[in-house]
Image (cartoon, rainbow, N blue to C red):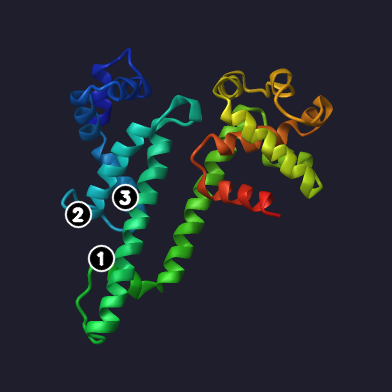
Amino acid sequence: MLSLLFMSKKKNRTLEETVLLIQQGDRQLLNQLIDSYKPFIAKTVSSVCRRYIYESDDEFSIGLIAFNEAIEKYSPDRGNSLLSFSEVIIKRRVIDYIRKQTKNQHISIDITNPLQEEESPGSVIVNELSLDEFNKKNDEELRKDEIIHFQKVLTDFDLSFSDLVEHSPKHADARKSAILTAKMLVANEELRQMLWEKKRLPIKQLEKMVSVSRKTIERNRKYIIAVALILSSDYVYMKDYIKGVLDI
């Protein structure tokens, strides 16, 4: 409700435009934005902790810091909205915090008093699942969130996962070459902006920068676009996959 009120006062300014003003140094606007989006932060943190989150909770403080971090790091070039970008950052930071807490709590119980029954928020989770199971479950949820978000981004480029399966290079060397081409594209700010704005691969400009032929670039166009989108966004798990391909 507060976020709607905040935006209604700035009818001609989008949320992303507000963030750009904050990045230019408007601290008062930053405080107003964070205050108005506390319900969003609490809801996002709650989805990770699987319980209602109060503003007095440590996890909520982690969420506030993460939201501020998202505001500082946000760039329209990523192709994400601020909220989708900040949701990923908040979840990641809260999970990191819980992992540290549960690990410390697990060690404390084992060493100092194996029979102690007092439960902290972290030990509750340890009692429900082993630490490894908890980490695995949250990794799976974050990976699923990435895939869902990436699927939406692909739609903007008139692409789908079935397209990527069909047009992915069949040989390891060809995949490496396509990925390296995508990395060169992303490293060039002008070409990266062209990709996001025009929703197509700047083949003419790109062929001057790489050692592969125009025909090869065109043949792997969809795969190169997909990899470039991953590399220029905040996709942790998909980037790990790409690193794995390059390490083949």
Q: Earlier in the sequence, mark 3 or mark 1?
A: 3
- The kind of residue tagged 2 is Asp
- Residue drawn at the location 74% of the way across and 23% of the way down: 207
Q: Residues within 10 Å of mark 2 (few under 14, many from 20)?
A: few
Total numbered circles = 3
Q: Specify the quadrant of the image occupied by residue 186.
A: top right
The residue beneath circle 2 is 57
Tag 3–tag 2 contact (CB < 8 Å) = yes
Q: Residue 98 location, x and y as percent?
A: 32, 61
The image quadrant where one finds the N terminus is top left
Q: Earlier in the sequence, mark 2 or mark 1?
A: 2
The residue beneath circle 3 is 45
How much space separates mark 3 and mark 2, taking CA atoms? 10 Å
> Which element type, helix, strand or loop, lies under badge 1?
helix
How much space separates mark 2 and mark 1, taking CA atoms? 10 Å
Q: Is residue 200 left or right of residue 85?
A: right
Q: Is residue 127 left or right of residue 167?
A: left
> Which element type, helix, strand or loop, lies under badge 3?
helix
- The kind of residue tagged 1 is Pro
Q: Residue 151 location, x and y as percent?
A: 59, 39
- Residue drawn at the location 35% of the way across and 46% of the way down: 90
- The kind of residue tagged 3 is Val
Label disc, if present, on residue 121 of the rendered structure:
1
